[in-house]
Image (tube, grey):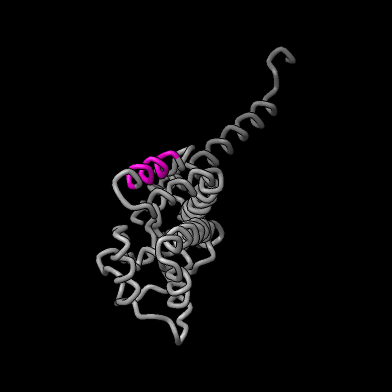
Amino acid sequence: MGLLGSPIAGADTITADTDREMCIASENDTSGVVTFWEGVEQDVRDQRLSELDEQDPGIKDAIEAYIAEAPSAPSAAVLQTRLDALETGEGLAMLLPESTTDLEVVDPQNQQRFQTDYTYDEAKQIVADIPEEPAINVQTQLDQAAAASTRLAEIRAEVFSQRTEDYNQTQFDLRDDFQSCIDEIEDARPIPAQYLILGGAGILALAALGLRAWSNSRTPNRHDN
């Protein structure tokens, strides 16, 4: 799904490598962002399979058997032939969970690599790019895709519109997590030498000022003579 489904890690999955000044994302499927999109896609698939089953009874069970890798499941080619006969413009890969797609049905050009290492500058950019209403831009893109694409895209836009608050929260958690990493990197940086020198000079100046004040207090007042 392009940037909409970018597998960037969510809250509690990012740690700071202060030596390399990198933010490291855990490569797993339990982050808030990943979990959110998995839930959306599952509901989108369920609704669309039910609709297709009304046009071709039994196709939902057949596709679910294929997903479950049941011995009696039809091949990907057979399922795609049935989908083509419905003239919906949808490929089998669109109806499969990402974890079950294989080279037989997936377009390699659409595969994304999970990025795990983010530089300090990349992390700063991620934080800056997350707006106060993250769902607005995503909803716009989904609506545009729905207007020019398949019924599956229409359902996705509809499902997302009902979960914008949940999506926004995943983005806020993501932003906070990257900001924590940024702060940790900055806190671990050595203090520049010029600040140490200035700090030392300041201490000496304060010491000299204190010495002068003490000396003045020891000097007899001329009015006392």
Q: Residue 22: x percent and y percent? A: 41, 61
In the visual, does 110 lie left or right of 119?
Answer: left
Determine whether 29 is above or below 158 in the image: below
Q: Residue at x 47, y 55 (%)?
A: 185
Q: Residue at x 39, y 55 (%)?
A: 152
Q: Residue at x 35, y 73 (%)?
A: 79
Q: Residue 148: x percent and y percent? A: 29, 46
What segment is highlighted magenta in the picture?
136-145
User: Residue lying furthest left in this view?
Assistant: 109
Report the magenta stretch's main SS: helix
Count of numbered tags: 0
> For residue 110, what is the image quadrant?
bottom left
Q: Quadrant of the C terminus?
A: top right
Determine whether 155 is above or below 90 in the image: above
* Residue 119 part of the magenta-drawn span: no
Q: Residue 114: x percent and y percent? A: 38, 66
Q: Residue 187: x percent and y percent? A: 51, 52
Front position in the image: 141 or 64: 64
Determine whether 12 is above or below 129 in the image: below
Is there any visible trace of residue 149 in the rendered image? yes
Is there any visible trace of residue 9 in the rendered image? no
Q: Quadrant of the N terminus?
A: bottom left
In the visual, does 210 lie left or right of 180?
Answer: right
User: Residue lying furthest right in this view?
Assistant: 224
